[in-house]
Image: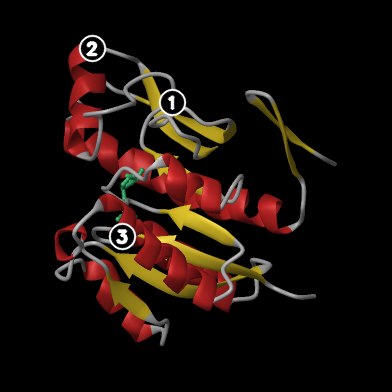
């Protein structure tokens, strides 16, 4: 069986990246991570990729004269590596409609809440968990969705909930959410690779 060629964009630690690579190397995923792009040269995810001989590229917006040129560079690299699915795994930059159109229905993102709660501009990283705790929700979780032209608003592929307990802090909630992210992101890639995801308007139908 041919493996889906996945390109990952990440800005930070890369635990989701690691999980995808590990499952792929164990033969548990019909996909292969062929390239990693980061906007930060100090991101630990770069080291993780090097440990697995995965090509890495640091592409920083400030090295380009416009957002368009910056994204053009990323599109070029992803195409050079014949990427069939782009996975945003903790990527802290918002991509323009132009980039999204270049990989139409082929970009997915993981977000650390149950969308549409605690998402959109300004809700990233620990801020999401802080907001969830402050609001007093009893359930939070993670969402994998297709990326469209609005932030965190594309059709939802999978969600998984976690219970928020009275003594949770943003940090402990982040840990719980990370654990479910590590389940649902590889699962979404698996479903995509097997051709089981069908977008119908706002809904994603998972075919048998
Ligand atoms: C995750 O919480 C993800 O939902 C968010 O960024 C974080 C990345 O974590 N988009 P890691 O770098 O994969 O550990």
Decide: few, some or many residues near mark 2? Use Cα within 10 Å; few <14, some 14-19, many ≥20: few
Residue depicted at 39% across the width and 70% down the height? 36
Question: How many numbered markers are drawn?
Answer: 3
Q: 151 and 169: which one is in front?
A: 151
Disc 3 to disc 1, C-alpha distance: 33 Å
Q: Earlier in the sequence, mark 2 or mark 3?
A: 3
Q: Earlier in the sequence, mark 3 or mark 1?
A: 3
Circle number at residue 114: 1
Residue depicted at 66% across the width and 56% down the height? 190
For the N terminus, give its image quadrant. bottom right
Decide: few, some or many residues near mark 3? Use Cα within 10 Å; few <14, some 14-19, many ≥20: few
Q: Is mark 1 within 8 Å of ligand 1?
A: no
Circle number at residue 135: 2
Give coordinates of residue 78: x percent, y percent: 48, 69
Q: Earlier in the sequence, mark 1 or mark 2?
A: 1
From this viewpoint, is residue 166 visible?
Answer: no
Is residue 150 depicted above or below 87 in this figure?
above
Give coordinates of residue 175: x percent, y percent: 29, 44
- Residue where numbered disc 3 is placed: 69
Q: Residue furthest right?
A: 208
From this viewpoint, is residue 62 visible?
Answer: yes
| Residue 47 sits in quarter | bottom left
Of circles 3 and 1, the one toward us is: 3
Is residue 91 depicted above or below 202 in this figure?
below
Of circles 2 and 3, the one toward us is: 3
Question: Left or right: where does residue 161 sit relative to residue 31?
Answer: left
For the C terminus, give its image quadrant. top right
Give coordinates of residue 93: x percent, y percent: 27, 47
The local secondary structure at tag 3 comes to helix
Disc 1 to disc 2, C-alpha distance: 14 Å
Circle number at residue 48: none
Decide: few, some or many residues near mark 1? Use Cα within 10 Å; few <14, some 14-19, many ≥20: many
């Amino acid at each position: 069986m041919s493996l889906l060629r996945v390109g990952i964009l990440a800005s930070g630690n890369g635990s989701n990246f690691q999980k995808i690579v590990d499952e792929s190397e164990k033969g548990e995923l019909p996909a292969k991570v062929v390239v990693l792009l980061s906007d930060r040269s100090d991101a630990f995810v770069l080291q993780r990729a090097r440990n697995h001989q995965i090509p890495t590229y640091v592409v920083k917006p400030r090295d380009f004269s416009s957002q368009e040129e910056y994204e053009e560079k990323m599109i070029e690299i992803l195409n050079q590596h014949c990427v069939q699915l782009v996975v945003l795994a903790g990527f802290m930059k918002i991509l323009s409609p132009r980039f999204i159109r270049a990989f139409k229905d082929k970009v997915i993102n993981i977000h650390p809440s149950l969308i549409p709660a605690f998402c959109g501009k300004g809700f990233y990283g620990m801020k999401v968990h802080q907001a969830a705790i402050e609001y007093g929700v009893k359930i939070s979780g993670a969402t994998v969705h297709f990326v469209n032209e609005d932030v965190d608003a594309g059709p939802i592929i999978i969600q998984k909930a976690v219970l928020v307990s009275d003594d949770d802090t943003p940090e402990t909630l982040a840990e719980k959410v990370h654990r479910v992210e590590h389940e649902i992101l590889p699962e979404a890639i698996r479903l995509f690779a097997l051709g089981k995801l069908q977008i119908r308007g706002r809904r994603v139908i998972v075919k048998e």
